[in-house]
Amino acid sequence: MSDIYTMGVDIGSTASKCIILENGKEIVGQSVISVGAGTTGPNRAMKECLEKADKTFEDIDSIVATGYGRNTLKLADKQMSELSCHAKGANLIFPKAQTLIDIGGQDAKALRISSNGRLMNFVMNDKCAAGTGRFLDVMSRVLEIDVSNLADTGEKWKNRIDISSTCTVFAESEVISHLSNEVDVCDIVAGIHRSVASRVAGLVKRVGVVPPVVMTGGVAQNSGVLKALEDELKVSIETTELAQLIGALGASLYAYELLKS
């Protein structure tokens, strides 16, 4: 019996992610391209993923697309909501997880998931960028710090600074004001992390904080935000090095189920 290869493509607003699974279990290829819907990102992500897996499109038995730009991928066999795919992908890595926090480039989501990875309930942020990766991007630009260095910078805080504005534009002005008053950058970054955590914790509490709690999405790579969320929710939060690829992983799993159904 020949092996089955399925591809999941998560086309987000700021990044394109792709995973290839062998027989619905083993990841044989993965890629993340830092541009999303409406760009060359999806094609580049699929090409890179195929190269890493040493496969071609002819080897792929089924493709499922998810994410903000999922309907633009015409070669996909099916499109699935990113909520369902994130729940499915998280369940493979964390089979006991019941609460999932996903913070992406332009949205934040809190999900309750069942023991078999099905979505039970969810809450998303409104149209404001506060509490999302975009908020961190804007603040890192103002602070002239690469967004990947925010966590290390925030770890060195000494004096508590709170960013009280919930609007990204007003928060940006608040950060500039702190800089003008020569407030230590480390204290400001820690305040930014607490601001994101406070916003997202409100979503999580609305669906109910039931452990084990898992965090996925690109912002999960920022340990400062994760720690601030743990403090806000008073619960331990697990994550994975595949945090940014969980949606693509779930899509690939659904592609496998599509073949088996």
Image (cartoon, helix red, strand yellow):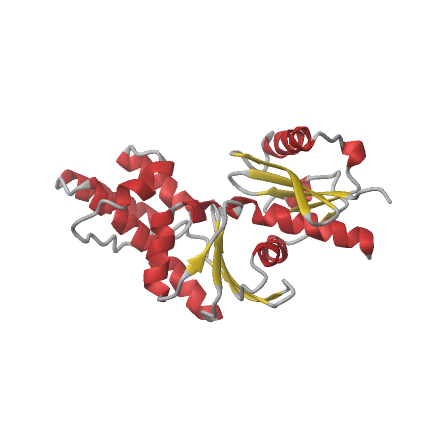
Q: Percent from the top left, x then y, of residue 110?
A: 49, 61
Q: Percent from the top left, x then y, of residue 126?
A: 46, 57
At x 59% / y 32%, what residue is drawn?
41
Would residue 166 be seen by someone viewing this image from the given angle? no
At x 30% / y 41%, what residue is drawn?
152
Q: In the visual, does 145 lie left or right of 20?
A: left
Q: Percent from the top left, x then y, of residue 145?
A: 30, 34
Q: Percent from the top left, x then y, of residue 249?
A: 63, 48
At x 23% / y 44%, what residue is drawn?
156
- Name above or below for residue 96 compared with residue 166: below
Name the residue at the front extreme.
Answer: 1
Of 127 and 87, nearer the camera is: 87
Q: Quadrant of the N terminus?
A: top right
At x 49% / y 65%, what residue is drawn?
212
Would residue 259 be seen by someone viewing this image from the given angle? yes
Of 135 and 209, nearer the camera is: 209
Q: Quadrant of residue 27?
A: top right
Of 1 and 91, nearer the camera is: 1
Q: In the visual, does 207 lie left or right of 191?
A: right
Name the residue at the right extreme.
Answer: 1
Q: In the visual, does 79 lie left or right of 224?
A: right
The mark total stands at 0
